[in-house]
Image (cartoon, helix red, strand yellow):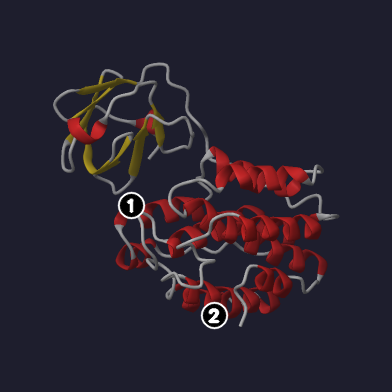
Amino acid sequence: MALENLKTGSVGEIVSCFANSFYIRTPDDELVFVTNHHLRSPITVNLDSAADFEYSLKPLDPAFFEQAELRVGDNLAIDLSGAPTLANQPNLPILGIEGLREVLYIATTVLAIVDTRQSVLDDRSIAYDGAKQFALTGILPLRDSNNTESFRKTVEGIVGLGVGFTPSGDDLLAGFLATYNSLARAVGRPKILLDFEFLKESTNWISAKLLDYMQREVVDDQVAQLIRSVGSVERGDFIIAMENLLPRGHTSGVDIAVGTVLAVTLLLDVATNGYGTEAIIRRLGLSC
C-alpha cells in the first residue's frame, strides 16, 4: 500500500507491537511498519520520537487516517503532512563483473568470522539443513537449466523454518529473491515470484508479507544498497554494505546476506557461463 494513497477512515489494526515499532495490517491485506528507527523503506513510517509503543499500544488496536493524521489506539497521533515518500527500488543492471568473484570470496570470509549462531550458517540451527538443500537442490539446478520447478519445490522446505520474528528460512529466501529479481533481467532470466497464499500458509503473516515485498523488490535502504553495490566499480562497496546489514535483528542480517551472496554468485555464473557457485556454497559451509 502506498502511504501517500491513504484514504480517510479505517487504515487497519495493529498486528504486532514492540518498544520501538509496530505493524499495521490494512483491510486490503497490506502492511505498514511504524518505527522510531531511521531505516527507510516504501512501507515504513519513520518517526522522530522516543515513544515506547509496547506500553501504549497493543495488538488489535485500530488505526485511522484523517486530515493527514494517522491515529493509532487511544493516544497516538502521527502527522504525515509533508512527509517524503520512498519509491520502490528500480531494476538494477549487473555491472562490474570483473573482480566480483573475488568480492564474493571476501564476503564468505566475513561471514565465517562474524557471529552466525542460530542463522542458516549454524549447523546446529533448525534452518541449517533446509538452507543446505536450498543451495544444492534449488540454486544449482536453477543456474544450470533455469529449473524453477525444482527451485520452487525446494523452497517449500525452508519457508517458515527457524526461530525468531522472521524465521531464518524466510530471510534467506527474501535476500535471494530480492537480489535475483532485481538483477535477473540483465542476464536474460525471468523473475521468480512465489504465490502469497503459499507464503502465508507456511509462515507467520508478517514474515510472509515482508518476504512478498522483498521478492517484488520493495526493499529498505540497506538491502537496496547491498544489491546496488553489485554493480559498483569499487570492490569494497559490497563488503561495506553487507557489514552494515549483518547486525540486523537476531540473525536476519546474516540470513539476508547469505541469500544475496548466493543470488549474486548464481547470476555471475549465468553471465559468464561459469561454475563458481559450488565454491561459494562450500565456503559458506552449505555443501555435503
Sequence-first disc among 1 and 2:
2
Q: Which numbered disc covers residue 183?
A: none
Q: Quadrant of residue 211?
A: bottom left
Q: Which residue is mark 1?
A: 206
At 48% from the left edge and 61% from the top edge, which residue is drawn?
Answer: 117
Residue found farthest to the right: 98
At 66% from the left edge and 55% from the top edge, which residue is drawn?
Answer: 110
Up-down relation of residue 92 to residue 208 (above or below): above
Residue found farthest to the left: 74
Q: Look at the image and tell me whether residue 26 can be seen.
A: no
Up-down relation of residue 81 to residue 87 (above or below): above
Percent coordinates x, y for residue 157 in the rendering: 43, 76
Q: Nearer the viewer, residue 106 or 35?
A: 106
At 39% from the left edge and 60% from the top edge, which residue is drawn?
Answer: 167
Q: Look at the image and tell me whether residue 17 can be seen.
A: yes
Side of 8 where 134 appears, left or right: right
Where's the N terminus, which quadrant?
Answer: top left
Distance from disc 1 to disc 2, alpha carbons, whole Å, reads 26 Å
Q: What amino acid does circle 2 point to?
A: Ser
Percent coordinates x, y for residue 280 in the rendering: 70, 68
Q: Nearer the viewer, residue 74 or 209?
A: 74
Q: Which residue is mark 2?
A: 150
Q: What amino acid does circle 1 point to?
A: Ile
Up-down relation of residue 273 to residue 253 (above or below): below
- Please tell me whether mark 1 sits on a helix, a strand or a loop: helix
